[in-house]
Image: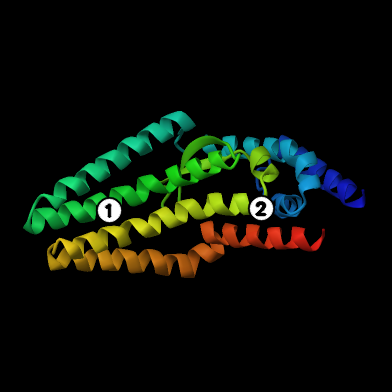
């Protein structure tokens, strides 16, 4: 009961600040609060809707300064892009020389970008997590991403949340590795194999150096810890 009261008070203060136009959720301690609620199913069930409402208001305020799209439209565009990328790859396999190499590299790049949010979406929906909008994220704000609905996110078990986060990261990693393996088998031009090796190494290094601190793998590790903590409390 004490934890409920403390969260109720803290969330009330955050809601009041957001209502005044203060959307600095990190500075307000909102994400720390979300982490605490996410580790306790009882708290998640009680506060999920209110947390989702605050998150939605802040996102909508931020979204006024960026490009967003409905989930159905974002999925349609990403799926169309993925099919184009796959088509380029398959077409490249029937070619030779530099045309083949270019097709393999370009197709892999398109699939890496498009399959990332689609994997998040597909696995998330299969595990009970819904989404609200597509938006552009990443350091350069050009990476298509899909926004989770925090009410369904917090009510999902930690390992389900972890699986959703891992899905996009794994899709991005497996694409260049699989295309690289195919490129070696079909004896694609050496330069294209080197490019695919470089891409594979870069995405792996990025995961190790950055994603475990600010990206998908950080969230995966967070949810795995939440799962372990919930087991200890039983």
Dot 2 or dot 1, earlier in sequence: 1
Q: Nearer the viewer, residue 73 or 61?
A: 73
Q: Which label number is shown at residue 60?
A: none
Left or right of 149 in this view: 105: left
Q: Residue 154, how many percent across, how many down?
A: 68, 45
The C terminus - image quarter: bottom right
Q: Residue 3, how many percent across, how many down?
A: 87, 51
Left or right of 48 in this view: 200: left
Left or right of 82 in this view: 147: right
Count of numbered marks: 2
Above or below: residue 140 compared with residue 191? above
Which residue bears the numbered disc 1?
108
Residue reaching furthest right?
1
Tell me the residue at 54%/38% (across/down).
125
The image quadrant that residue 79 belongs to is top left
Q: Residue 144, how many percent across, how many down?
A: 42, 44
Left or right of 85 in this view: 230: right
Query: Is disc 2 placed on a helix, strand or loop?
Result: helix
User: Is residue 215 visible in the rendered structure shown here?
Assistant: no
The image quadrant that residue 56 belongs to is top right
Tell me the residue at 83%/48% (across/down).
7
Disc 2 crowd rating (10 Å Cα; few below 14, some 14-19, many 20+) is: many
The image quadrant that residue 206 belongs to is bottom left
Q: Which label number is shown at residue 158?
A: 2
Q: Nearer the viewer, mark 2 or mark 1?
A: 2
Q: Residue 5, how many percent across, how many down?
A: 90, 46
Tell me the residue at 41%/69% (across/down).
205
Per the model, the C-alpha gap separating discs 2 and 1 is 31 Å
């Amino acid at each position: 009961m004490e934890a409920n009261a403390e969260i109720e008070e803290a969330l009330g203060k955050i809601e009041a600040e957001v209502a005044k136009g203060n959307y600095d959720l990190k500075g307000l301690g909102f994400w720390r609060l979300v982490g605490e609620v996410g580790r306790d199913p009882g708290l998640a069930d009680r506060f999920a809707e209110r947390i989702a409402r605050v998150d939605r208001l802040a996102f909508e305020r931020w979204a006024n300064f960026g490009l967003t799209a409905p989930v159905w439209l974002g999925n349609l565009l990403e799926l169309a892009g993925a099919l184009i990328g796959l088509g380029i790859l398959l077409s490249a396999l029937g070619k030779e020389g530099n045309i083949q190499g270019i097709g393999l590299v370009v197709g892999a790049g398109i699939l890496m970008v498009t399959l990332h949010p689609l994997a998040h979406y597909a696995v998330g929906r299969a595990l009970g997590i819904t989404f609200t909008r597509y938006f552009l994220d990443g350091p350069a704000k050009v990476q298509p991403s899909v926004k989770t609905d925090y009410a369904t996110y917090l009510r999902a078990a930690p390992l389900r949340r972890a699986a959703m986060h891992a899905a996009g990261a794994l899709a991005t990693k497996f694409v260049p590795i699989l295309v690289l393996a195919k490129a070696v088998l079909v004896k694609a031009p050496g330069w294209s194999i080197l490019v695919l090796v470089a891409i594979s190494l870069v995405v792996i290094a990025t995961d190790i150096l950055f994603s475990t601190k600010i990206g998908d793998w950080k969230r995966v590790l967070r949810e795995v810890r939440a799962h372990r903590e919930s087991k200890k409390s039983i």
